[in-house]
Amino acid sequence: MVSWVSYLGLALSALIAATLLPMQSEAALVTLITLSPSAVYSLVAVAALGNILGSQVNWWLGGQVHRWQNRRWFPFTATQLESAERWYQRYGRWSLLLSWMPIIGDPLTLVAGILGEPLWRFTLLVSLAKTGRYAVLAYITLYVLE
């Protein structure tokens, strides 16, 4: 049986992993599924929810970019921001379905916020991507790695 502390740890690791901070939540999910296979649905739901909330943090930060971009500590150049905006405008909101991917997924959610993607649509597309990612990982853990 998985304790509430394990669920909280999983949710926090998934939330942080979805922001621009370096962290992986997959190992926590695989470990918890291995320890308690009967809790797979709730574990996937908690991991997905944490990851979706982390993506919403990125979306919010993206909405604040123009306010902060002239600060000395700001990590992106104007050229980098323009390049990211062009990419998102070219491929559109459907590119958010790739938000599950390492390296490009988190910056993609930030750019969606910069360009003012509506939160409801952003959340819907990111939810599909993130839940699918964790569901596939759970399936692999339960049936392929057994």
Image: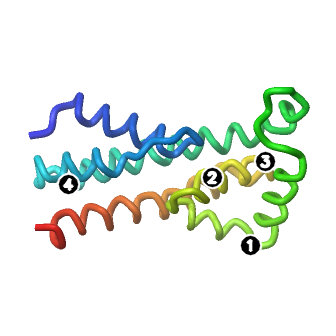
Q: Which badge, 3 or 2, is on the more N-terminal residue?
A: 3
Residue shown at 21% from the left, 30% from the top: 4
The answer to whether mark 4 and mark 1 are in CB contact below 8 A is: no
Q: Residues within 10 Å of mark 3 (few under 14, many from 20)?
A: many
Q: In the rendered image, which quarter is residue 83 located in?
A: bottom right
Q: CA distance from mark 3 to mark 4?
A: 35 Å
- Residue where numbered disc 4 is placed: 40
- Mark 3: secondary structure: helix
Q: CA distance from mark 3 to mark 2?
A: 15 Å
Q: Measured along the vertical axis of the image, is residue 84 above or below residue 97?
A: above
Q: Which badge, 3 or 4, is on the more N-terminal residue?
A: 4
- Residue where numbered disc 2 is placed: 120
Estimate the x, y position of residue 44 in percent, counting from the top left. Answer: 30, 53
Looking at numbered disc 1 in the image, what kind of residue is underneath it? Tyr
Q: Which badge, 2 or 4, is on the more N-terminal residue?
A: 4
- Residue where numbered disc 3 is placed: 114
Front of the two marks 1 and 2: 1
Q: CA distance from mark 4 to mark 1?
A: 34 Å
Residue shown at 40% from the left, 63% from the top: 133
Q: Is residue 86 left or right of residue 21?
A: right
